[in-house]
């Protein structure tokens, strides 16, 4: 019972470390109650506790899954709750593997475990497949100095330090209880040294980037991001062909675009994911023709580029979740980006392409085609200066590879369009944004994030969230985007170095302890 309660307490503290609570500092000791409680417990009790920790974190951080399943799948809310429970049973299951590894190593060498626990956790965390690519390291998104550690080794290097902190503080609690606090002094000094080193590195990195991008002489691209506050019910109605809904969606975006044009005269206006509710450039009825005519008429008075989230279809009748770039003198969009990382259980299903009958089981799911990956789009400001942008759509912003690939092709910024309206207003919009901020911190690239219902924002190369909109408001967010002027980060130069380092160290630990002769075992003659 004590282990179960402690696991739930740690899960609650873990949850508070993340949005919407935003209490990142709690992560330094969030897992301590659970680690202390399993001292002396059987292996089975520890693994059961780890499973409960996994389940509690799932419910705490991902409770919005129930709402998403219910609204997106158009099923009763009880079905959404059942889906949440299934999801929570496996999404954070890496904790069970971590405790299993902890048991095995601690039995052989507690001291070596204390040295390697963070790297072992990071290795397991990276290798375990997760639907949303999250890690405990992401909770530091709002610690402006400490989060700069991600520019060295991604969010997983932060996770390693967090676990190291929790293990040392748990050991300290046990030593205090046993009256042997002196045994904890050296580990605590090392932990303090690591924290101080990360702080001073972060201070230097953050202030250097701020100084670079505060230079008014840098070329700028003026970008207006349109948040028309189109909720999921309106989008469903528009996509099903209801005339008034479809016309209203386009009209709202055009009105805000005109406001941006008159007030800011931007070089680029961005509409969010699937803002255009049908196939753009391939009208199927009179509503589509009227909508495209209105856009074309408005564009005749706009000197910049219009980027529109919508749907595309190829010659094989495969539909794509897309972002269209419509130049100032173009009658139709000539550059189209197709989303390539699809949301499992939202935009595709396992084996759906190999077994088409699967698509008939869930007819409300989009089952989009998969694009070709990273794409570079070059635009010019009114001074004729070129800017190189790499687009991504919604879920793709959770993956570091998109940022690393953008750096490798010398992009100036990442542009992301998102629709979070399916997930409700509690938890997910804030968590999604928090995970996305690491694309900036890892690469020193700006991230322009345009959403349907919030949160639309500019993520500065430092990782700061600037000019953010509120949820459920109509708003135009206009940014003067600076050209990329800082050098490449360590993690963007060597994207997988920390992954290989942590995995290699973990394997070496296993090999070393596997061949190590147990204590008091006589040497064979």
Image (cartoon, grey):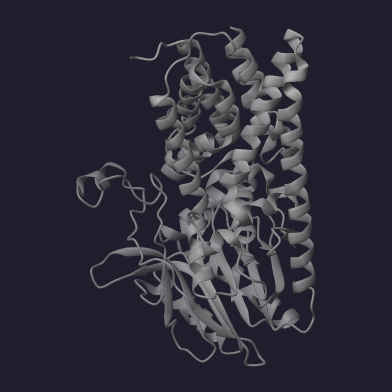
- Image point (52%, 65%), residue name: 275
Answer yes or no: is residue 515 visible.
Answer: yes
Judge left or right: residue 13 versus residue 203: left
Q: Is residue 340 above or below residue 472?
A: below
Identify the residue at horizontal 47%, vertical 10% (top origin): 520
Q: Position of residue 223 (x, y in %)?
A: 66, 75
Q: Is residue 176 above or below residue 276?
A: above
Q: Answer above or below: position of 328 versus 315.
A: below
Q: Quadrant of the C terminus?
A: top left
Q: Is residue 36 left or right of residue 50?
A: right
* Residue 186, x across and y down, in percent: 73, 28
Residue 108 spot, x, y in % from top left: 49, 19
Q: Quadrant of residue 280?
A: bottom left
Which residue is drawn at the image coordinates 50% and 53% (left, top)?
A: 497
Left or right of 104 in this view: 219: right
Residue 194: image location, x then y, percent: 72, 42
Q: Hey, which quadrant is residue 298 in on the image?
A: bottom right
Q: Does residue 425 show up?
A: no
Q: Residue furthest front?
A: 525
Lateral position of residue 524 relative to residue 379, left or right: left
Of the 4 image quadrants, the one containing the N terminus is top right
| Residue at image coords 54%, 43% | 134
The one nearer the camera, 401 or 76, is: 401
């Amino acid at each position: 019972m004590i282990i179960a309660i402690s696991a739930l307490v740690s899960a609650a503290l873990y949850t508070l470390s993340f949005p919407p609570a935003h209490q990142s500092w709690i992560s330094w000791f969030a897992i301590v109650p659970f680690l202390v409680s399993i001292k002396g417990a059987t292996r089975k009790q520890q693994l059961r506790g780890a499973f409960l920790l996994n389940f509690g974190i799932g419910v705490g951080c991902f409770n919005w899954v129930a709402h998403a399943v219910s609204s997106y799948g158009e099923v009763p809310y009880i079905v959404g709750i059942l889906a949440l429970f299934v999801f929570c049973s496996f999404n954070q299951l890496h904790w069970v593997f971590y405790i299993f590894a902890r048991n095995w190593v601690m039995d052989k060498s507690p001291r070596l475990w204390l040295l390697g626990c963070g790297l072992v956790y990071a290795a397991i965390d990276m290798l375990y497949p997760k639907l949303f690519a999250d890690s405990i390291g992401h909770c530091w998104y709002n610690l402006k100095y400490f989060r700069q550690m991600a520019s060295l080794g991604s969010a997983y290097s932060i996770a390693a330090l967090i676990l190291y902190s929790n293990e040392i503080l748990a050991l300290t609690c046990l030593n205090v209880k046993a009256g042997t606090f002196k045994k904890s002094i050296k580990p605590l000094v090392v932990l303090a040294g690591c924290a101080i080193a990360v702080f001073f590195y972060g201070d230097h990195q953050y202030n250097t980037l701020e100084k670079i991008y505060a230079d008014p002489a840098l070329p700028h691209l003026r970008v207006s991001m349109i948040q028309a506050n189109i909720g999921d019910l309106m989008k469903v109605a528009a996509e099903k062909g209801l005339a008034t809904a479809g016309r209203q969606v386009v009209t709202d975006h055009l009105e805000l675009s005109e406001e941006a044009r008159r007030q800011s005269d931007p070089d680029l206006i961005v509409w969010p994911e699937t803002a255009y509710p049908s196939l753009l450039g391939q009208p199927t009825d009179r509503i589509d023709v009227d909508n495209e005519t209105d856009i074309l008429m408005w564009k005749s008075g706009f000197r910049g580029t219009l980027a529109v989230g919508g749907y595309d279809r190829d010659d094989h009748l495969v539909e794509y979740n897309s972002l269209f770039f419509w130049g100032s003198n173009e009658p139709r969009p000539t550059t189209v980006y197709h989303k390539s990382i699809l949301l499992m259980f939202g935009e595709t299903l396992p084996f759906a392409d190999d077994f088409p009958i699967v698509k008939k089981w869930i007819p409300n799911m989009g089952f989009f085609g998969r694009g070709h990956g990273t794409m570079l789009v070059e635009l010019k400001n009114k001074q004729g200066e070129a800017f190189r942008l790499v687009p991504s759509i919604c879920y793709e912003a959770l993956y570091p590879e998109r940022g690393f690939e953008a750096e490798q092709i010398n992009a100036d910024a990442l542009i992301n369009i998102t629709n979070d309206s399916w997930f409700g207003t509690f938890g997910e919009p804030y968590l999604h944004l928090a995970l996305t901020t690491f694309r900036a911190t890892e690469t020193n690239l700006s991230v322009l994030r345009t959403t349907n219902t919030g949160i639309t924002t500019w993520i500065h190369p430092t990782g700061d969230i600037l000019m953010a909109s509120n949820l459920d408001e109509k708003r135009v967010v206009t940014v003067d985007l600076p050209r990329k002027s800082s050098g490449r980060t360590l993690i963007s130069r060597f994207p997988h170095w920390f992954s290989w380092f942590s995995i290699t160290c973990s394997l070496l630990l296993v090999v070393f302890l596997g061949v190590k002769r147990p204590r008091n075992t006589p040497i064979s003659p």
